[in-house]
Amino acid sequence: MQKRLLNLNPHSFRKIVSTLLEMNGRGYWETSEENLDRLRELYQEVEDRIEGIE
C-alpha cells in the first residue's frame, strides 16, 4: 500500500506520514521508536522524490 500511495500521489503520502508524526509529537498517538524512525525515513524519501532528488 505504501508503494502504491507513494507512486500515485506523493503529496498525499507525505501528508499522511507528517500527520502521524505530528500526532505522536503531540501525544495523541503512541508507537515504538522503531516505527517513528521508519516514518521519518519515509518522510525524507517522499520529500526527496517530490523535490526531484533521487
Image (cartoon, rainbow, N blue to C red):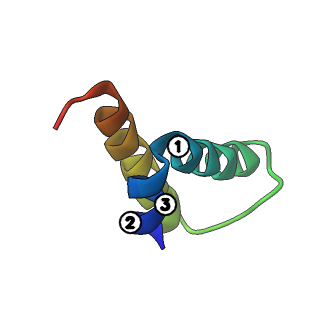
Write down the residue under mark 1: 14
Residue 2 lies, with reference to residue 22, above or below; the image says: below
Judge from the rendering whether residue 29 lies leftward or rightward of residue 10; answer left or right: right
> Residue 29 or 14: which is nearer the viewer?
14
Residue 26 lies, with reference to residue 29, above or below; the image says: above
Write down the residue under mark 2: 3
Which residue is drawn at the image coordinates 52% and 39% (left, top)? 11
Which residue is drawn at the image coordinates 63% and 51% (left, top)? 16
Judge from the rendering whether residue 8 lies leftward or rightward of residue 20; answer left or right: left
Q: Determine the residue located farthest toward the left in the rendered image.
A: 54
> Residue 2 or 4: which is nearer the viewer?
4
Callouts 2 and 1 close, C-beta under 8 Å: no
Estimate how packed mark 3 is, as few (under 14), some (14 to 19) or many (20 or more) residues with alpha carbons within 10 Å: some
- Residue type marked 2: Lys
Write down the residue under mark 3: 5
Q: Quadrant of the C terminus?
A: top left
Q: CA distance from mark 2 to mark 1?
A: 12 Å
Q: Say the numbered circle drawn on residue 46.
A: none
Q: Residue 46 appears at what percent x and percent y?
A: 38, 43
Q: Determine the residue located farthest toward the front in the rendered image.
A: 8
Callouts 2 and 3 close, C-beta under 8 Å: yes
